[in-house]
Amino acid sequence: MASVPVSKSMSLLSKLAWKKHLAGGLAFAVAVSAIAPADLSARGLIRDAETESLIRDYAKPIFRVAGLGQQNIRIHIVNDRNFNAFVVDGRNMFIHSETLKQSKTPNQLIGVIAHETGHIAGGHLSRLRRTIAKAQSASLMLQILGIAAFVAGAATGGAAGGSAGAAVMSGGQSLTQRAVLAYQRAEESAADQAAVRYLNATKQSSRGMLETFSYFVDQGFASLKYVDPYVQSHPMPQQRIIQLRELARRSPYYDKADNQDWAFRHELMRAKLSGFLESPRTVYTKYPPSDKSMPARYARAVVLFRREKNLKAFQREIDQLIRMDPGNPYFYELKGQFLLEAGQASRAVPPLRNAVKLAPNSGLIRILLAHALLTANQPRLIDEAVTQLRRAIVRENTSPEGYRLLAMAYGRKGLTGQASLASAYQYLYQGKLKFAKEQAKRAQTKFREGTPNWIKADDILKFQPPKLR
Ligand SMILES: [Zn+2]
């Protein structure tokens, strides 16, 4: 699991480069730069193969029955302590880490996803943009640009891009949400109804959604001072909950339980998030050492290494987890990640190879393995690193980290043209266009004109970020 921090170096600008296909087929979407107040530096996006895979499994059937199966909607996890989930366009859904931690069952989280999907399918977003354009308020427009930067940045899936946008999002949140509140009420019940339809069509209960939303109604009454941003963006008048309850209870699947596999993976995900994001005290309260379950061991394992710097104790715990479930790729991944972080790259390689074998579709884990292979610094491992990175980049095709490592690997092999081209992509997806072009120029001198690599470099050289109005 990696938290992508918000860069402090970003300046106040919202020069954006929208998704665009270049001549050579380069998919490009990046926030060139954005607003990043220093106090937001801890926030950003969370990338985690395990969490992302589970959420994809939850969302896939919902997207399909909503008619959005082909739209390639990405779900991003925002590192944030407030419960929230929102969509800002038809391609990107954002869920706060707190929402994942608070959802006690898969069904509760799936309900939130179904509701947000209802907003996408209902086209509530384009209406949002029109409404705000009509408002003609300069400051509001800035907020909207901020959100746009967030999406564009997050779409790169990479450090600089994602973090740039996240910062903007953080800054712009409350103002925008207040504006949104004014007209969104009608759309909330439409999204609820759509969500119940999707849940019924996938033979799942709406109970989790009802539980989540009821909790917010209670929260709204309990405290006027502190209300989660989710309540601001999704107004919860009691009438809405009454309607939803009616609708949910009519479903033949109301009492249907979550499938066991998801329920277990859900517990592991929450435990891991707790271990990474909460204080050791909170973690040990939730998962006391007397609790020998796998999720409890998982949460404590993270704390043992990350907070208590006790590599030995961590290894005992993670090895026990691996014995308990040798088929779980993420236990090997965590072991490898922490060994790598502890400076034991050679020892990180075998568990990471196992993780890749068990989760061959995860680009993130392949990048981590390549990182370990290159850090181990043995010539015989370089080719394996290149192979892993090339496969990783098929999925993580805008990952600056993937390209950074690839450039390093090519550099060690003496392939200077390839190395420069990979560096050019790294900078491109970090939004550092000037550096990207410098590297592309260098790369081009190493390739024959008209060859595929020459054309790729040329695409970067010719790329102009479109101007926003
Ligand atoms: Zn809503």
Image (tube, helix red, strand yellow):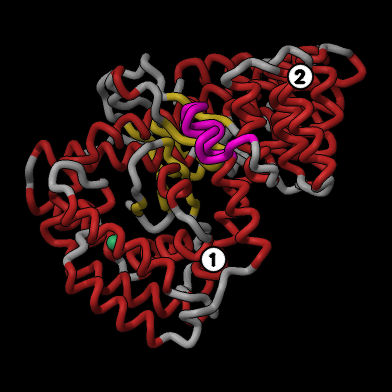
Tag shown at residue 403: none
Judging by the rendered image, the residue that carries numbered circle 2 is: 312
Q: Where is residue 78 in the image (x, y as percent from the top left)?
A: 42, 40
Q: Residue at x 80, y 26 (%)?
A: 385
Q: Which residue is drawn at 59% across and 27% down?
A: 303
Query: Is 120 positioned to the left or the right of 406 in the image?
Result: left
Q: Is residue 290 magenta?
A: no
Tag shown at residue 70: 1
Q: Marks 1 and 2, Cα distance to the nearest angstrom?
A: 46 Å
| For discs 1 and 2, the disc positioned in front in the rendered view | 2
Figure disc tally = 2
Task: Name the amino acid type tagged 2.
Answer: Lys
The magenta stretch is 272-289
Image quarter where the N terminus lies is top right
Q: Where is residue 423 in the image (x, y as percent from the top left)?
A: 61, 20
Q: Position of residue 153 (x, y in %)?
A: 42, 36
